[in-house]
Amino acid sequence: MACSSGSCGVKYDKKRYIGYAIITIVALMLPFLRVDDKHFFLLNFDKKQLHLLFTSFDMQELYLMPFLLILLFLGVFFMTTLGGRVWCGWACPQTIFRTIYRDLIETKLLGLRKNTNNKQKNPKEGFEIKKLLALLIWSVLAFLAASNFLWYFIPPEDYFAYLQEPSQHVTLLIFLASITGFLIYDAIILKEDFCVYICPYARVQSVMFDEDTILPIYDTNRGGDIYDAKGTLIATKPTGQNDECTGCEACVRICPTHIDIRKGMQLECINCLECVDACTKVMGKLGKETLISWTSTNQMAQGGKVKYLRFRTIAYSAALVLALVGLLLMGSTKEHMLLNINRTSQLFKINENTQKVENVYTFLFQNTTSRDHTYYIEVLNKNIEIKKPAKPFVLKAGKKSKEIVILFSDISSMGNNDKNVVVPIQIKAFAVDDKENISILRDTNFVYPSKKEIDEKIK
């Protein structure tokens, strides 16, 4: 199929770079976005909180985490079934880091590489000063990237304060130095070997592929065979009279994971589509369509359009929607206060002077709102009253308080019993200043003594 010179096919490089820039800006900016001191996403181990969509959840509310993990894994499965390792080539931090170091620092800024068309070769020997400068530039960026990663676990406002007191936050410094060191090693020494040999995603992705998964595919019908069915190299250039592949190997040289896409689908392929751009450029000069397209096996063999809607993609989409709805529903039931009730080791206490039986509890309150509130409790059972605390107490925003609570009842309330009697009771805790919106119910027990113990105590 003929076309005008240089215009055949879709070029992906600029779109990919724009995507990298958007992802980088979003990743850097998100930790600084706050609404009422709540972050878009923050898993704060220091303060034991989860911030999600500008809402904070205490560690006792981490029932949301399974939904987040389900969304993560289902999202990966859906994306892989639909577009192979498209995450790897278009959004993975590893790919972005390598692009910044190789294409921006080494090539554009310092000229250690003539261009980005050959990713198989390392920069030439010499240029030691430039290589050292590249190391220094990337080290600064690696430090920034490591800090950016930690900002999702330690909010920036705390992170910078902690760095001013390094002796008090040694663990933070160890993590920061370790992550920075790994990123330096990863981008300069490990490189795409991480994608090929270390990343587990490459090993599990193949089971998620089907004949409609879109991948970079070499058109053997037009280009000719370079490899046989067993993957053995036949010739560097097809010998058929109508074979269009020129054997230039531009698609091979530009591949960051060092594979030959003409061999067929390979686990090392990260769907960066560099090979598609390379072939588009070469074939465009000949006035022909690219031999490598981002398409599916079925579309390449049968023609027509790629089948995006199929059982797998619909099933994953439905599962994603259900998980998202579950997350939103669970998140909307956030409690504005938390309360744990624990009984003391002493089941009850008999007051012979007042003819009362007392039960002692430890109440752990937590104010999960961003405002100070005054709290108190009620017992929703007849015959049981509150002895302590005698009045409401103030709890500051986000703080916890341990309160000793004493409940009492008349000894005669349960009559004569040969054994201790355990009565289920219900406690209502509430904010006195906002009782309508901030109140919770908790169940516990009140224990009445047996007649024998009452008689022994009174005598």
Image (cartoon, rainbow, N blue to C red):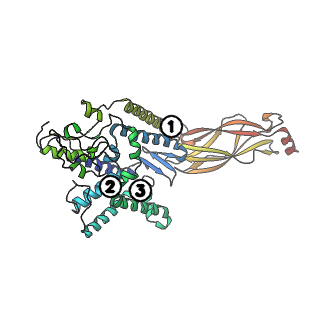
Q: Is residue 205 above or below residue 154?
A: above
| Nearer-the-camera pick, 298 or 450 | 298
Total label count? 3
Q: Is residue 17 left or right of residue 64?
A: left
Q: Position of residue 293 (x, y in %)?
A: 24, 40
Q: Which residue is mark 2?
A: 97
| Number of other residues with Cα within 10 Å of mark 1, as a class: few under 14, some 14 to 19, many 20 or more | few
Q: Which residue is mark 3?
A: 156
Tell me the SS state at disc 1: loop
Tell me the SS state at disc 3: helix
Tell me the SS state at disc 2: helix
| Number of other residues with Cα within 10 Å of mark 3, as a class: few under 14, some 14 to 19, many 20 or more | some
Q: Position of residue 453 (x, y in %)?
A: 84, 42
Q: Which residue is mark 1?
A: 333
Write the residue at 32% across / 62% down: 138
Circle 2: residue type? Phe
Q: Is residue 297 left or right of residue 33?
A: left
Marker disc for residue 91: none
